Image: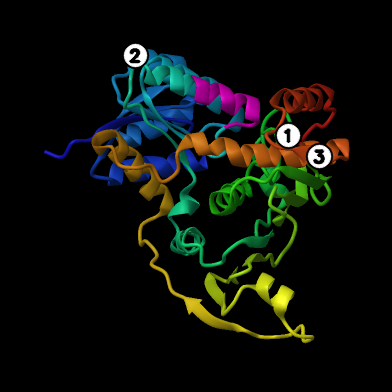
Amino acid sequence: MTETVKIGVIGLGVMGRDHLKSIAALDNTELVAVCDVYRASADQYAAEMNVTAYYDYHDLLEHQPMDAILIATPHYDHTPITIAAFAKGLHVLVEKPVAVQVKDAQQMIAAYEAAKKQHPKLVFSAVFMQRTYGYWRKIKEILDSGALGRLERITWLVTDWFRTQGYYDSGTWRATWQGEGGGVLLNQAMHHLDLYQWFVGMPKRVTGFVGLGKYHKIEVEDEVTAYFEYENGTIGHFITSTSESPGTNRLEIIGDGGKIVFENRQIMLYRNRRSTFDRIAHGGASSDENDYELEEVSYTHHDQSGHKIIIENFANAILHGEALISPATDGINPVMLANSILLSSFERRTVDLPLDAEAYAEKLHSLVEGSTFRKSK
């Protein structure tokens, strides 16, 4: 008989319902309970999946025998539920973003580290399923190989997140400081901020420019331009929006050894025959020396969904000690980038990293308390 991880799912929105199907389909997981504050929803999916329904996560954690929970609630709830689960010695898989702000993520990681003293094999993972996609894994492999040499510039234009006003009106919590804690940075582009830091690490300084409700009737950001600076002189750009159609997803990573260009799921790799820094120092008068080789890079893509792969990996980490694809402790980094971009724009200054978590917490609190935004019914 195959050993399984018994999982309870908290939050039955679009993603929570999708995760129910993945858990039921996998050989190494078993769905044992669902939980949602909306009783009708919890009852419906408990009946469909033949599991127990709960309406309060405290009751679930107190009374349901299980190994782990999957959290798919609105963002602010991730922190208290995670901390409560660790106090019970349960493994946790949390949807993105790990938290709304760095301060909350720090509290979650601290609770995890404390719980590991009693439960050394405790697993804490995050649903950054884009890390499973073949093209991103291939780009990560190229970068880790050192093929591009010393990096000069990273530019990511990712504006294919088009959202209508109807999308934002579909939930009372969406696109509000109190309900979601942010807009495109915290919701859609969180995946690409995670990939960005996974590829090239964290910058030391962030300058951000955001448009709050520029194209939609919302109070949070729907257009963003950010500039990143690294200690070694490398620079980065991150541009994202939910208003462009058709949108663009183009990534350029340039080093002295060549460059990667990704667009339309194609990876083009330019390999320089000699370092551009060497050519700068010792080249002739010409500035257009095309001293490189170009190849279209192939990659292997998984047939099953990325969400399903993340859940399967989470279970295998619990059962067999398999390395996590997306450790939740990494999740603080994209949250820090998002918080830093917002704080920089609000205060019209460059922000140094690591971010002052208390400073951002105070700013977010002031945004929540000072909000006069009301959604139309």
Identify the disc placed on residue 344.
Answer: 3
Q: Residue 155: give x, y in percent of width and height.
A: 69, 61
Where residue 334 sits, quadrant-wise, is top right
Write down the residue under mark 2: 63
Where residue 150 sits, quadrant-wise, is bottom right
Of badges 3 and 1, nearer the viewer stands 3
Does 301 sit left or right of 147 as displayed? left
Residue at the image position 59 percent from the left and 77 percent from the top: 274
Amino acid type, residue under disc 1 in the picture: Thr
Does 343 sit left or right of 300 as displayed? right
Q: Which of 149 and 305 is in front in this view?
A: 149
Does 177 sit left or right of 42 as displayed? right
Amino acid type, residue under disc 2 in the picture: His
Write down the residue under mark 1: 176
The alpha-carbon separation of the residues under discs 2 and 1 comes to: 33 Å
Determine if residue 339 is in view.
yes
